[in-house]
Amino acid sequence: MTLHADLKVTRGAFRLDAELVVEPGEVVALLGPNGAGKSTALRALAGLLPLTGGHIRLGGQAWDVPPDVFRPAERRPIGVVFQDYLLFAHLSAVENVAFGLRARGAGRAAARAEAARWLDRVGLADHAKAKPRTLSGGQAQRVALARALATGPDLLLLDEPLAALDAATRLHVRAELGRHLRDYPGHTLLVTHDPLDAVVLADRLVVLEHGEVVQQGTPTEVARRPRTDYVADLVGLNLYRGTAHGTTVSLDAGGTLTVATPATGPVHVVFPPNAVSLHPDRPAGSPRNAWRVTVAGIEQHAHTTRVRLDGVPPVLADVTTATVADLRLQPGDELWAAVKATEAHAYPS
Amino acid sequence: MALVLPAVVGLAFLLVPLVGLLVRAPWGTLPARLLSPSVGEALRLSLVCASLATVVCLVLGVPLAWLLARGDVPGRGVLRALVTVPLVLPPVVGGVALLFVLGRRGLVGQYLDAWFGVSLPFTTAGVVLAEAFVAMPFLVISVEGALRAADPRYEEAAATLGASRWLAFRRVTLPSILPGVVAGTVLCWARALGEFGATITFAGNFPGETTTMPLAVYLALETEPDAAIVLSVVLLLVSVGVLAALRDRWISGPS
């Protein structure tokens, strides 16, 4: 059962025209700058906004095929986590989670029992009776996730689910969200403008600009070969999967990196291309990551020059035009790449 | 000084009549008069009619407020203005209008009479209608204001959880606007309780059937001034009670 969506929405001067395919169990991140049409796409999939063209189909079911078919939100098997969660203030956490079950016909006792199980799964069994205003941001986010998943939806839509959290909470909640998304058998679409959320949580990225899909692929593909300046600036990250043992991470693709904060188990290591410096010889001293690389390509971007380098691991480096001239960079050149441990961040995955 | 003097006069102007009412009240015979059949009857009729009128206003007014706040209707501004007309209309005009629409020969009344044998003017039901007509805008405006302040995205969240529009309204929106609904209901009830002009025009003045407290006050003033004062004191106490119930919303002001 695959989700096929050809989202065409015209509203005033704005036009969304994006095709999305999501397989069961797959997490697709819809990434793009503000005003790119991400929210419009999410609202259309949720049934809160009718399409003006195209179609939305899940398996054999037509959800929206204008002008003939339109299933409103309440008749689609969906779960939505909104950016500011929209928990019902007058209901307790467990009543919030039970709301969807009740609305879909479950009895009071059965709905409450199921809701309590979900709260337990997100680690909030102790807060079942708490009103939303007494919950922290991270807790509210988990209640919102439990509420969205409790009805067993076929499609889970997440609208900037981490945007409202502070940086410290975010790290923790992101890892936890990742675990729940891996367990979830349905289709997941994550809308975000934060590339880190996208690369850590999603199996595939779809980048939207001005209402159109400009690039899609696995996070690594998109990160390594950005097609537009926006993608290059934001998603053009050095991104590796690996296994952490303290501050040392063994990368799945080969090689090791030293990171600042210790971690254990599977992680993503991320650092921006401008954190990479290039040297003709092995840089002396200092607790840096340094390894041999070969120049594979040089691309001129708006403000910098991006150098693609092969090695173990391969890496992207943004360097100034002066550096390009100094090192007389040419494809095939052998160099040393260096990254400070403090610049390389490991995120549990 | 130029401001203080008129301010004090203004305050006295508002308070002295009320104080005078309390001073003139025949406190010694008050309990006996309150329990007298005619006062008791008027009081009971007033409470019953005002409460029924409030129920009518709630049943019709809350959906109307929802339509004005959320509905996708053309000319919403005009509609909203029309709804508030009874607020500024002299109640006696409202009574006349009701009479010519619902009267036995009226636009709608003739069919009610011919098809169902129902005649509304000069009945207790007529009192309820007249009160509801005058009081409903208070409820509609209060509830509509609360609805417009409430975030409609909560209704969307409820919809994504499988709730129909009605369920979303009942279980999500209504609880969130409850303070506004309560305030509007109390205000509406108080207005219905004090209704005079539309009631006497449309429902007449028949003791036990359409003579509510305000009508009884007016009636008693000529024959039995002491009874008029007693009834007035009762209405005054009810008004103060309403204000006390709404103190947080209406009296506290910006602090």
Image (cartoon, coloured by chain):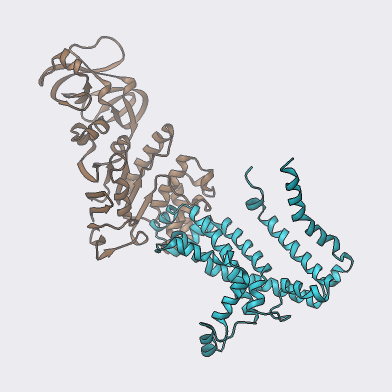
Chain colours: A brown, B cyan
Q: Is residue A238 above or below residue A27?
A: above
Please identify the quadrant where the N terminus of chain A is shown.
Answer: bottom left
Locate residue A252, reporting x and y percent.
23, 30
Q: Residue furthest front?
A: B2
Q: Is residue B205 above or below residue A308?
A: below
| Closest to the observer, A242 or B177 | B177
Q: Residue at x 66, y 72 (%)?
A: B197
Q: Is residue B143 left or right of residue A327?
A: right
Locate residue A209, reporting x and y percent.
24, 41
| Closest to the observer, B155 or A102 | B155
Q: Residue at x 47, y 62 (%)?
A: B68
Q: Residue furthest right?
A: B28
Q: Residue at x 28, y 43 (%)?
A: A36
Locate residue A184, reporting x and y percent.
33, 48
Q: Is residue A100 left or right of residue B233?
A: left
Residue A55 in sight in this render: no
Please identify the quadrant where the C terminus of chain A is shown.
Answer: top left
| Closest to the observer, B237 or A178 | B237
Q: How many marks?
A: 0
Residue B86 in sight in this render: yes
Q: Is residue A26 left or right of residue B208?
A: left
Q: Quadrant of residue A4?
A: bottom left
Locate residue B215, reporting x and y percent.
72, 74
Q: Quadrant of residue A233?
A: top left
Q: Is residue A267 above or below residue A309?
A: below
